Image (cartoon, rainbow, N blue to C red):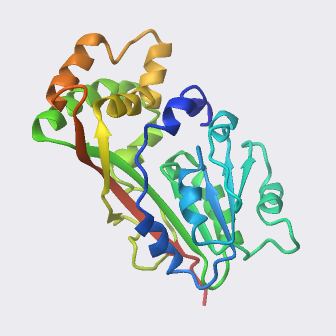
Amino acid sequence: MAELFDKQAAIYSDSRPTYPAEWYKMLADLTPHHSLAWDVGTGNGQAALGVAEHYKQVIATDTSEPQLKHATPHPRIRYLHTPPSLSDDALANLISPAGDNDSSLDLITVAQAVHWFDLPRFYSLANRLLRKPGGILAVWGYNDITVTPAFDAAAKKFHDTTLPYWNSKIDLIFNGYKSLPFPFENVGLGSEGSPVSLDIPKKLSFEGYLKMVSSWSAVVTAKERGVDLLPEDTVRELEAAWGGARLVRSVAYKGFMLAGKVKVCL
C-alpha cells in the first residue's frame, strides 16, 4: 500500500494531527521495561518521536521510502525502509539484530496504518517479537474531525464525494476500528470490537485542513483518474463554512485505540 502515500508524502508530513504526549506516557506505564520499541508504518516518524521520549531505542519502519525522507531525525530512533518482499526473519533481524530477537520488544505501535497491513502476518510477527510477559501492542487511528455543525455538514458533503476512490481497507478507519480483528489480551485500552475513544485536540487553520484532505489517498487517486474532488467551488463552500481562510479554530479529531498483550496459552 506504500504507493498510495508516496506521491503526497511532503503534504502528509505537515498536515496531520499531533498525537497527545499523554498517549505515550499511558502506554509506557503499561510496559515494565523500556529498552526497545518498534513503530510500524512510521511514515514521517510522528509516533516514533513520541515513543522515543519513553524508550531507549525505537526502530521505526515503513514500506514507503518517500515518507521516510520526511522523517524527523532523533538520536534514539533508527529509521528503516522495509519493503513488503522482506521475509519475517529478515525483518526480525533488522528490528532486533543482537542475538535472540524473539520476545525482545517492549512496545509495538502502529499509528493510522494497521488497516493497510496483512493482519495475520503482522499479528504473527508481533506475537513472536513482543516481550513475554509485559510487551504491549498498541494500534490507533482517527477519522472524523469536529469543528462546528455548519462546517461538519459541509465536510460530510465533500467526504461523500471521495467514497468511490478509497481502497476498501479504509472501511476499518471509517468504523473506528470496531471491526478490526485484534487477537490480544485486554490491558484496559480497548478490546476487539470495542476500541477506546481518544479525541485529538488541535489548532487548525483552513489551509491546514485543505492540506490534510488534499493528502487523502482517495483525492490523489481521483486526480490520477481525471477527477478533481477539490474544485474551486467546493473549496469556496468549505472555506465559507469554516468562517474564512485566516480563521484558526480549535478542532477535535475523533481518535480510537486498541492495546493488548500476547495471550498466554495455558
Q: Which of 141 and 205 is in front in this view?
A: 205
Q: In this view, does 214 lie above or below 254?
A: above
> What x and y, as percent, mark residue 135?
61, 77
Q: In this view, does 250 lie to the left or right of 225?
A: left
Looking at the rendered image, the quarter that the C terminus falls into is bottom right
Q: Give how far across and how far down residue 232 sits, in percent.
A: 28, 11
- Side (left or right) of 179 relative to 74: left
Q: Residue furthest front?
A: 246
Vertical order, 121 against 215 (above or below): below
In terms of image quadrants, where is residue 247? top left
Image quadrant holding the N terminus, namely: top right
x and y, in percent, of residue 84 in the image = 72, 43
**Going 61% across and 62% down the picture, which residue do you hit?**
123
Residue positioned 45% across, 74% down in the render: 26
List the single residue furthest toward the top.
226
Point 40% across, 61% down: residue: 20
> Which residue is located at x 68 percent, y 72 percent?
56
Residue 251 shown left or right of residue 135 in the figure? left
What count of labels does the image hold? Answer: 0
Furthest-bottom residue in this view: 266
Q: Could you tell whether 189 is left or right of 53 in the image?
A: left
- Residue 174: x, y in percent? 34, 45
Q: Residue furthest left?
A: 150
